[in-house]
Image (cartoon, rainbow, N blue to C red):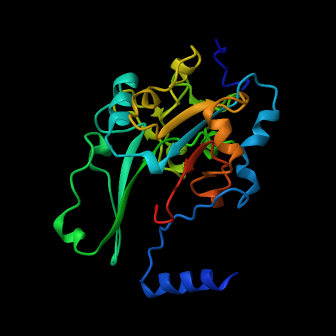
Amino acid sequence: MMPIPSPIEADTDSRREFLRNILAGTATATVLMVFGPGAMALSDPTRRTKNKAKHQFAYVININNCIGCGNCVRACNKENNVPASVFRTWVERYVVTDEGVYVESPNGGLKGFEAVNKKLRQNFKKSFTVPKMCNHCEDPPCVQVCPVGATFKTEEGFVLVDHAHCLGCAYCVQACPYAARYIDPIKHVSDKCDWCYHRVKNGKLPACVTVCPNKARLFGDLKDPESEVTKIFKEDQWMVLKPHMHTDPTCFYIGLPREVV
């Protein structure tokens, strides 16, 4: 069993063309840049195994396997008693057409998604679903802005919130580049995905991982050479969201399309 930590202790032509398209209104300014291995040295997950912690956990989401069923969202809500108006994890659907990219997440993807509507199907190219959550960053901006140390990071890679000390000031909500935090409408404190820390410290997987029917969600210890996540990183398949933010996420993606926003 892991001990509960203390918050106290604890240039190219294509680029120019892209910018011209934005100014001309033919490209969206909110396009998310995603990169694979080697694109950003800070996102090398293997360097994290060199610390003294017994475990170094990481989360992997395989877009190729996600079917948008919403099982993960429902399991998370039940496991963590998430209020109806907010989400610790959610699923977005991206519909790519000749006219642009349409993004939707009806009720966080809680009940899955209906068929793409007739109008979008006329110019349809492809669609895919993308689960999202707290990225448990190696350099989390939410920790930096918390005025009382209620948000903190453990040696094992968890970014957690101490609700006993949280003021509900929402500084961390504003600082998160992944829109993964919210103020609990009932408790009036900051909250987010914590990778089901209460389960993991007892040797269990996060609830969302256990209910995924297609293994789109994986969780494991980078210090375990036999874990699924470790093998994925050895094969250099991973990508991260918003590497330009320099947060060094610990939530990694496989098959993340460039249309993700």
Q: Quadrant of the N terminus?
A: top right
Front residue of 133/180: it is 133
| Residue 47 seen anywhere in this rendered image of the structure | yes
Front residue of 94/133: it is 94
Q: Is residue 184 shown left or right of residue 219?
A: left
Q: Is residue 179 shown left or right of residue 237?
A: left
Residue 249 image offset from top left, x and y in percent: 63, 46
Q: Is residue 121 shown left or right of residue 92?
A: left
Q: Dividing the picture into quarters, in which one does residue 15 lie?
A: bottom right
Residue in view at x 69 percent, y 42 percent: 138
Residue in view at x 59 percent, y 46 percent: 252
Residue 72 image offset from top left, x and y in percent: 38, 34
Q: Name above or below for residue 92 compared with residue 133.
A: below
Residue in view at x 75 percent, y 22 percent: 54
Q: Name above or below for residue 4 compared with residue 82.
A: above
| Residue 175 seen anywhere in this rendered image of the structure | no
Front residue of 257/7: it is 257
Q: Name above or below for residue 214 compared with residue 196.
A: below
Q: Is residue 153 shown left or right of residue 257?
A: right
Q: How many marks?
A: 0
Q: Name above or below for residue 82 compared with residue 108.
A: above
Q: Dividing the picture into quarters, in which one does residue 111 lie?
A: top left
Residue 151 image offset from top left, x and y in percent: 60, 33
Residue 34 image offset from top left, x and y in percent: 58, 61
Residue in view at x 56 percent, y 43 percent: 135
Front residue of 24/188: it is 24
